[in-house]
């Protein structure tokens, strides 16, 4: 496998990989989901540490990109979703220190109102007891990430671990809404959930790359990219490979680059190294 990876790197250097328009779009969307989820991470940590008296009043939180490409994270009231408890502004790529924190202006904006509505609708669908579409695993939580474009709103649901030392790929979903927040459809992005370790066991060789296969799509998903970027500072491996029906996606965590190649070419290279 290590020799195969060397061949992959050589192919990269000679630009023998093809990068599709769909892959480009997935990469950009995955990066934005990562930035928004990162804002939610830091915003939640700061809010719970600095406003403990408001903890029981939280109805939920979400992050979005503003017109200046900054990330805003809001916490809204459980008693009145139109009331904002705190509004954070982060850099384009969020850090632990927010640019600003606003706990004075409580009025929700029209954009925030729609995003809160679709987030709340998604939450109800996920935890509705009669809905078997969504799977729930022990020691995990489901993170809700609304994504708004010019024509519609996509809400991504990503499974996150509650234990340290593992990265979870799979058990993720995409819900589609109109630009007004009307529900349209829901879909599973993976058929299962897999667990990847941060690092190799003591005494074992360092993990260079990890891999998983796709049944539902040919390409890596935007949620895969989001998750990989969120944990890249914690894992020892720097590359992740996704094997689809016809294509193989190769994502470089350090360079944040995505390349695709035909699966039959990838398998041919692999067999040559056996």
Image (tube, grey):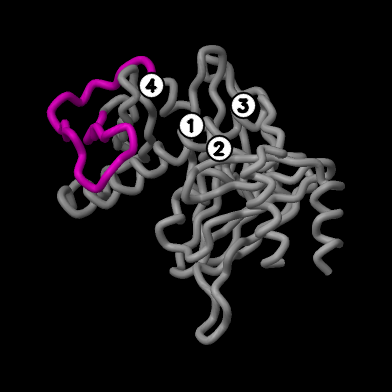
Where's residue 37, x and y in %? 41, 42
Residue picked out by circle 4: 113
What residue span does the magenta drawing correspond to?
A: 84-113
Tag 4 and tag 3, C-beta contact below 8 Å: no
Q: Is the residue marked by circle 4 packed among few (<14), some (14-19), or many (20+) residues within 10 Å? A: some
Examine the image and state in which quarter residue 208 appears: bottom right
Residue picked out by circle 3: 176
Where's residue 84, x and y in %? 25, 30
At a point 69% along the width and 29% down the height, the residue shown is 20
The quarter of the image holding the C terminus is bottom right
Q: Is the residue marked by circle 3 packed among few (<14), some (14-19), or many (20+) residues within 10 Å? A: many
At a point 79% along the width and 47% down the height, the residue shown is 215
Tag 1 and tag 2, C-beta contact below 8 Å: yes
Q: Is the residue marked by circle 1 packed among few (<14), some (14-19), or many (20+) residues within 10 Å? A: many
- Return the disc, 4 or 1, that comes first in the chain's sequence: 4
- Return the disc, 1 or 3, that comes first in the chain's sequence: 1
At a point 81% along the width and 55% down the height, the residue shown is 269
- Return the disc, 3 or 2, that comes first in the chain's sequence: 2
The answer to whether 84 appears left or right of 117 in the picture is left
Does 166 sit above or below residue 80? below
Tag 3 and tag 2, C-beta contact below 8 Å: no
Rounded to the nearest whole Å, what is the CA distance between mark 4 and mark 1?
12 Å
Residue picked out by circle 2: 156
- Return the disc, 4 or 3, that comes first in the chain's sequence: 4
Please tell me whether residue 88 belongs to the stretch shown in magenta: yes
Which label sits in the foreground, 4 or 3?
Answer: 3
Residue picked out by circle 1: 146
């Amino acid at each position: 496998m290590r020799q195969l990876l060397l061949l992959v790197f050589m192919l990269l250097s000679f630009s023998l990989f093809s990068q599709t328009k769909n892959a480009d779009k997935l990469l950009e969307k995955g990066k934005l989901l990562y930035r928004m989820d990162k804002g939610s991470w830091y915003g939640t940590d700061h809010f719970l540490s600095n406003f403990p008296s408001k903890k029981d009043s939280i109805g939920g939180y979400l992050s979005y990109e503003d017109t200046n490409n900054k990330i805003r994270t809001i916490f809204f009231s459980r008693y009145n979703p139109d009331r904002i408890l705190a509004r954070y502004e982060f850099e384009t790529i969020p850090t632990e220190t927010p640019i600003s924190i606003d706990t004075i202006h409580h009025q929700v904006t029209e954009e925030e109102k729609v995003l809160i509505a679709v987030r709340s609708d998604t939450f109800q669908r996920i935890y509705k007891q009669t809905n078997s579409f969504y799977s729930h695993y022990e020691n995990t939580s489901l993170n809700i990430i609304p994504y708004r474009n010019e024509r519609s709103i996509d809400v991504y649901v990503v499974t996150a671990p509650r234990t340290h030392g593992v990265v979870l790929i799979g058990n993720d979903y995409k819900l589609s809404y109109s630009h007004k927040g009307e529900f349209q459809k829901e879909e599973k992005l993976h058929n299962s959930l897999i667990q990847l370790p941060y690092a190799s066991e003591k005494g074992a060789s360092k993990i260079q790359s990890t891999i998983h296969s796709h049944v539902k799509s040919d390409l890596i998903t935007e949620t895969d990219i989001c998750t990989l970027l969120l944990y890249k500072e914690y894992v020892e491996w720097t590359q992740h490979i996704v094997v689809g029906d016809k294509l193989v996606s190769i994502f470089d965590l350090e360079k944040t680059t995505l390349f695709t190649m035909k699966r039959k070419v990838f398998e041919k290279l692999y067999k040559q190294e056996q």
